[in-house]
C-alpha cells in the first residue's frame, strides 16, 4: 500500500514539473509584458529598467529555475498587471470558482441521476425522448452560447435574474460566499447551470446506459423472481450498481468543470480564477499564468491520486494482484 | 463558527431587504471592457485609468469635454518669461482626508511624478523645477521654452505630501514589486472620493462634499459604480436588462440593436485616436525579400500606390459600419496643431496605383507581410483583412499577420516589420507629440514609435523648432509645413479616426457629455 502511494506521488511530482516546464516555455510566445505595463509615452530606458528588474533578460532556463525555486518555497511571484502577490490574488478568486464548480457538480448529480434512471426505466415514454433531446442540445451546444442564450432569456427578456457578476456576498472570514442570500443565489444560478449542463447530460446518458445494462443482468432477474418490489429492484439493486462508474467519472469531471469555468466565467463576468487567467493571458502576466496552470495541474493530479487510491480500496482484485506479485 | 455564519447571513438578508430603501439615491453604474490598472496617479498611463484618476485627484488645470483648459487647483496662471510659469493656487481646498492643500503638495507631486519609475513622467519631461513662492503660489521652470506646458498640466496629478509621507509612499512602484500603498489607496482633491476598489470587480466612488466646486457641480450623483465586463455580449445584455446605466464601447454590430431599444440610446462621436499604416523606410532589403537587396518602400511612388490602393470609404462603410471618419491627417480635429487643409484623405484610385507601381519597376508586385493587432483597435483585424485584396489588386503579395497586441507591439517597438497598422492619441493633445514619437528619428527621445524609421531632414529640423517655438502662429506654420512634407512623402498612410459608441439608458440617465476620449468623466453625468 505505501509503495503504491509513494509510486503515485513520485509520478505526480514528475507530472507537475513537466506541466510547469511546458507552460513556462509556452510563455515565451505570449509577448513582452513590459509593453502592457507602461504607457505609450514611456522611454526606452524606462522599459529596459523594468525588464531588467523583472528578470526578463535572464535566459529562459534560469527564469524557470528561479520560478520553481520560489514556488517550492510557496512564493509564486508578483502579478505584473496588479503588482500584488499571485498567491493572494488566487486565494481571493478561488472561493468564487470553487463555489461555482461545487454547485454545478451538485446540480449535475441531483438532476442527472434521476433523469438517467427515468429514461433508463421508461425507454419509450415521451418524457424520456424529451430528456434525450435536451441532452443532445447540452452536449452539442458550446458553453458560451448556452450562457448567452440564458442571459438573453432570463436576464434581458424576462428580467428575473441579474446578467453578470457575483453579488449578495456574505463574509465568513476566509471565505466570501454567495450561497447564503437570495441575491447571491440569483447571481450564481445561471452560470452554475450553464457550467453544469454538459456534465448533467453526460451523467444522464451514463446512468441510462448503465441502467439498461444492469437491468438485463441475471441478479436483477433473480430479484424479480424473488418477488421484490419494483422500487427495491430499481433503486436498491440496479441504481446502486450503476453509481460506481458515475462517481469515478464525476471525480474526473470536476477537473473539467474547473477548466470549462474559464469560458463560463468570461460570459457571466464571474470574478473567479477563470476570469483572472483570461485577463492574465491578454496582459501576458506570466506569474499568474504559470501559477494557474500549475494549480490546475495540481487539482488534476490530486483528483487522479484520490481516484487511484479509491480503486485500490474498491477493487479487491488490485489488492490481490499487488500482494501476490511480491516483488 | 456556524453560529457566526448564520448571524452574518441573517444580517446580510436584512441588509438585502432594506436595500431598496436606498434606491432613491442616484447611483450611476457603468461598465467598460477592463478594470483600471491602479490608483497611483503617477503611474498607469492608460486612458480609462487616467480618467478615473481625474475623478479622484485634482490637477492644476482641468480639460473640459471640448478639450479647452479650465482652472482646477490653479485659479490663474501667467508666463513670466520663456521658461517660467507662475500658477496661483486655489485657497481653502482640502484633500479627501481633510488635510489642507498648499504649494508644498504641488512641489512634492512634481518630485514624485518626475521619478524615472513613474509612467506619467512624460507629462513633466520639460519641467526643470517647481518651487513654492508662498503657500498659494508656485513657479514652474522648464529646461527650454515649452509651448505645450499647459497642455500637459491636466496630466499632472496633485497628491497630499503629508499623507504620502505618513504611508511611506513616495516611490512609484511600477507593475511587479512590492505592493504599493499608493496604488490601492487614493487621497486627492478631486470631486469624487474612493469608497472601495475590488480589483476586476468594481470601483465605487462618492461625491466629495467638501470639494471646492461642489456647489456648482453639474453632476447630481450620490454614488457611482464602475464594473469591468470583458465580454461584449454580456455588456450589451447588462445594459438591455437595466443593470447598468451606461457602457462603452458598444460593439459595432450591436449599435442598431441598441438603438432599436426604447430605453437605450447610443451616443456616437469621433475619437482622438488616429489609425494609420506605416512602412519600413530604413532597411536596404525588405524583410520579405531576402537576397533581393531591394526595399520597394524606399520609392515614394510605391508608398503612394499603397495609399491610393486602400479604399478608405469602403472600409468606413463596410468594416466600420459608418463608425469611423476617414482622414488624411496624422492627428484628429481637436488636437492642438490640427491642419484642416491637410485632412483630405488620399483618394482611392487603383488604376493610378498600378501605374505608379509599374513606373517604380514593381509592376509585377512584391511580397510583404502586413503586421496587424487583433485585439487593440475597433475591428483592427477586419480592416487588415479587407485591405489584403485591395493591395493584391495592385500586384502586392500580402501575407497578413494579425496577432494579439502584446506580440504586435513587440514587433513595432523592435522595428521588426515592413508594413504595419498602429493607432495613436497624442498624450499631450498637441501635434508635437506625433512629430516626436511617430515621424522623426534623430533627436533625444524621438522616434519611440517610428517603427518604419521614416525620416526627412526637413521634418526633423521643423520638429526641433516646433518643440521650443512659443509664438503660437509661427508654431502653427511650422507644424503645417512639417505635416505637409510628411504627407507629400507618404511617410505613413492615415486611415481614420474610429468612432466612440456609448450605450446609455434613457430612463435613468438624463444627460451625459461625451468627450472625444473613450471613457466617462463623472463630472458630466446627470441622472433622472
Image (cartoon, coloured by chain):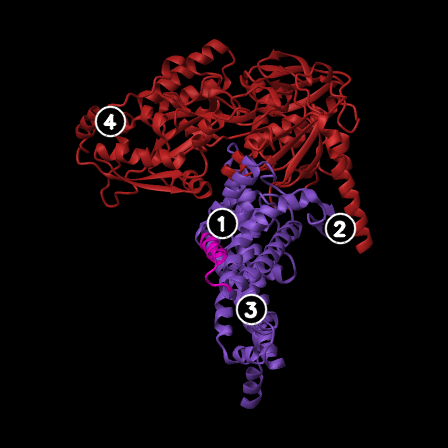
Q: How crowded is mark 4: few (under 14 residues within 10 Å), some or many (20 or more)?
A: many
Q: Give me the C-alpha separation between circle 3 and circle 4.
A: 69 Å
Say whether marks 3 and 4 touch (CB < 8 Å): no
Labels 3 and 4 share a subunit:
no
Where is mark 1, residue-wise? A143
Marker disc for residue B301:
4
Labels 1 and 2 share a subunit:
yes
- Chain that bears disc 3: A
The quarter of the image holding the N terminus of chain A is: bottom right
Instruction: Name the one closer to the observer, A239 or A73.
Output: A239
Going 56% across and 35% down the picture, which residue do you hit? B238
Q: Chain A is drawn in which colour?
A: purple
Above or below for A316 versus A31? below
Q: Give me the C-alpha separation between circle 1 and circle 2.
A: 31 Å
The quarter of the image holding the C terminus of chain A is: bottom right
Q: Residues within 10 Å of mark 3 (few under 14, many from 20)?
A: some
| Majority secondary structure of magenta residues | helix
Which sits earlier in the primary sequence, circle 1 or circle 3?
1
Which sits earlier in the primary sequence, circle 2 or circle 3?
2
Say whether marks 4 and 2 touch (CB < 8 Å): no
Q: Which chain shows up in red?
A: B
Where is mark 2, residue-wise? A172
Going 47% across and 9% down the picture, which residue do you hit? B473
Q: Give me the C-alpha separation between circle 1 and circle 3.
A: 23 Å
Q: Give me the C-alpha separation between circle 4 and circle 1.
A: 51 Å
Above or below for B208 versus A254? above
Image quadrant where residue B301 sits: top left
Where is mark 3, residue-wise? A248
Position in image of residue A25 (x %, y %):
47, 57
Amino acid at each position: 500500500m505505501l509503495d503504491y502511494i509513494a509510486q503515485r506521488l513520485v509520478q505526480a511530482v514528475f507530472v507537475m514539473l513537466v506541466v510547469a516546464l511546458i507552460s513556462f516555455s509556452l510563455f515565451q510566445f505570449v509577448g513582452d509584458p513590459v509593453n502592457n505595463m507602461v504607457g505609450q509615452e514611456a522611454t526606452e530606458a524606462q522599459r529596459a529598467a523594468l525588464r531588467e528588474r523583472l528578470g526578463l533578460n535572464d535566459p529562459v532556463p534560469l527564469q524557470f529555475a528561479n520560478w520553481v525555486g520560489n514556488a517550492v518555497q510557496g512564493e509564486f511571484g508578483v502579478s505584473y498587471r496588479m503588482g500584488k502577490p499571485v498567491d493572494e490574488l488566487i486565494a481571493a478568486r478561488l472561493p468564487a470558482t470553487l463555489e461555482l464548480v461545487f454547485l454545478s457538480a451538485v446540480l449535475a448529480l441531483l438532476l442527472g441521476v434521476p433523469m438517467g434512471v427515468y429514461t433508463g426505466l421508461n425507454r419509450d415514454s415521451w418524457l424520456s425522448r424529451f430528456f434525450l433531446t435536451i441532452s443532445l442540445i447540452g452536449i452539442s451546444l458550446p458553453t458560451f452560447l448556452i450562457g448567452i442564450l440564458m442571459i438573453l432569456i432570463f436576464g434581458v427578456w424576462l428580467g428575473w435574474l441579474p446578467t453578470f457578476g457575483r453579488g449578495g456576498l456574505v463574509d465568513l472570514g476566509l471565505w466570501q460566499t454567495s450561497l447564503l442570500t437570495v441575491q447571491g443565489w440569483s447571481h450564481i444560478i445561471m452560470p452554475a447551470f450553464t457550467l453544469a449542463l454538459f456534465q448533467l447530460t453526460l451523467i444522464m446518458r451514463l446512468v441510462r446506459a448503465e441502467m439498461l445494462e444492469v437491468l438485463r443482468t441475471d441478479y436483477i432477474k433473480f430479484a424479480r423472481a424473488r418477488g421484490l418490489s419494483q422500487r427495491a429492484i430499481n433503486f436498491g439493486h440496479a441504481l446502486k450498481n450503476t453509481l460506481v462508474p458515475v462517481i469515478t467519472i464525476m471525480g474526473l469531471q470536476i477537473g473539467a468543470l474547473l477548466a470549462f469555468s474559464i469560458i463560463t466565467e468570461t460570459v457571466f463576468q464571474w470574478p473567479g480564477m477563470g476570469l483572472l487567467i483570461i485577463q492574465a493571458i491578454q496582459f501576458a502576466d506570466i506569474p499568474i499564468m504559470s501559477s494557474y496552470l500549475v494549480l490546475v495541474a495540481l487539482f488534476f493530479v490530486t483528483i487522479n491520486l484520490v481516484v487511484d487510491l479509491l480503486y485500490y480500496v474498491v477493487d479487491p482484485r488490485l489488492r490481490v494482484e499487488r500482494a501476490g506479485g511480491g516483488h | 463558527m456556524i453560529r457566526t455564519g448564520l448571524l452574518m447571513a441573517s444580517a446580510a438578508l436584512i441588509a438585502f431587504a432594506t436595500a431598496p430603501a436606498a434606491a432613491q439615491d442616484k447611483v450611476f453604474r457603468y461598465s467598460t471592457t477592463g478594470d483600471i490598472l491602479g490608483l497611483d496617479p503617477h503611474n498607469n498611463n492608460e486612458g480609462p485609468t487616467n480618467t478615473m484618476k481625474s475623478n479622484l485627484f485634482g490637477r492644476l488645470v482641468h480639460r473640459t469635454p471640448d478639450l479647452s483648459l479650465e482652472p482646477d487647483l490653479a485659479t490663474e496662471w501667467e508666463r513670466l518669461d520663456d521658461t517660467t510659469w507662475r500658477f496661483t493656487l486655489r485657497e481653502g481646498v482640502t484633500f479627501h482626508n481633510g488635510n489642507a492643500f498648499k504649494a508644498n503638495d504641488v512641489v512634492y507631486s512634481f518630485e514624485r511624478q518626475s521619478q524615472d519609475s513613474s509612467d506619467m513622467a512624460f507629462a513633466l519631461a520639460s519641467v526643470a523645477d517647481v518651487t513654492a513662492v508662498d503657500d498659494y503660489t508656485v513657479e514652474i521652470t522648464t529646461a527650454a521654452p515649452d509651448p505645450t506646458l499647459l497642455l500637459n498640466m491636466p496630466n499632472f496629478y496633485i497628491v497630499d505630501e503629508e499623507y504620502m509621507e505618513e504611508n511611506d509612499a513616495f516611490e512609484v512602484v511600477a507593475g511587479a514589486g512590492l505592493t504599493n500603498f499608493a496604488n490601492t489607496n487614493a487621497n486627492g482633491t478631486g470631486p469624487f472620493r474612493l469608497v472601495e476598489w475590488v480589483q476586476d470587480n468594481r470601483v465605487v466612488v462618492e461625491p466629495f462634499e467638501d470639494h471646492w466646486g461642489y456647489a456648482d457641480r453639474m453632476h447630481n450623483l450620490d454614488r457611482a459604480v464602475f464594473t469591468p465586463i470583458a465580454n461584449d455580449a454580456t455588456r450589451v445584455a447588462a445594459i438591455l436588462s437595466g443593470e447598468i446605466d451606461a457602457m462603452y464601447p458598444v460593439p459595432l454590430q450591436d449599435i442598431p440593436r441598441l438603438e432599436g431599444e426604447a430605453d437605450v440610446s447610443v451616443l456616437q462621436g469621433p475619437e482622438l485616436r488616429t489609425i494609420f499604416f506605416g512602412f519600413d523606410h530604413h532597411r536596404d532589403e525588405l524583410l520579405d525579400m531576402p537576397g533581393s537587396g531591394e526595399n520597394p518602400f524606399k520609392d515614394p511612388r510605391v508608398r503612394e500606390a499603397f495609399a491610393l490602393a486602400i479604399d478608405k470609404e469602403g472600409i468606413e462603410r463596410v468594416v466600420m459600419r459608418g463608425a469611423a471618419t476617414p482622414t488624411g491627417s496624422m492627428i484628429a480635429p481637436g488636437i492642438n496643431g490640427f491642419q484642416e487643409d491637410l485632412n483630405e484623405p488620399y483618394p482611392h484610385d487603383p488604376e493610378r496605383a498600378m501605374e505608379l507601381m509599374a513606373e517604380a519597376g514593381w509592376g509585377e508586385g512584391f511580397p510583404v507581410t502586413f503586421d496587424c493587432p487583433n485585439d487593440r483597435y475597433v475591428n483592427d483585424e477586419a480592416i487588415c483583412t479587407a485591405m489584403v485584396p485591395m493591395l493584391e489588386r495592385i500586384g502586392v503579395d500580402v501575407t497578413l499577420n494579425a496577432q494579439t497586441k502584446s506580440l504586435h507591439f513587440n514587433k513595432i517597438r523592435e522595428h521588426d516589420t515592413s508594413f504595419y497598422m498602429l493607432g495613436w492619441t497624442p498624450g499631450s493633445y498637441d501635434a508635437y507629440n506625433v512629430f516626436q514619437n511617430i515621424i522623426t528619428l534623430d533627436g533625444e527621445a524621438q522616434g519611440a514609435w517610428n517603427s518604419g524609421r521614416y525620416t526627412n531632414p526637413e521634418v526633423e529640423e521643423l520638429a526641433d523648432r516646433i518643440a521650443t517655438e512659443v509664438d503660437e502662429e509661427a508654431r502653427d506654420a511650422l507644424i503645417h509645413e512639417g505635416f505637409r512634407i510628411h504627407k507629400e512623402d507618404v511617410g505613413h498612410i492615415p486611415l481614420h479616426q474610429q468612432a466612440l459608441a456609448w450605450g446609455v439608458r434613457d430612463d435613468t440617465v438624463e444627460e451625459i457629455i461625451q468627450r472625444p476620449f473613450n471613457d466617462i468623466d463623472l463630472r458630466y453625468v446627470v441622472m433622472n
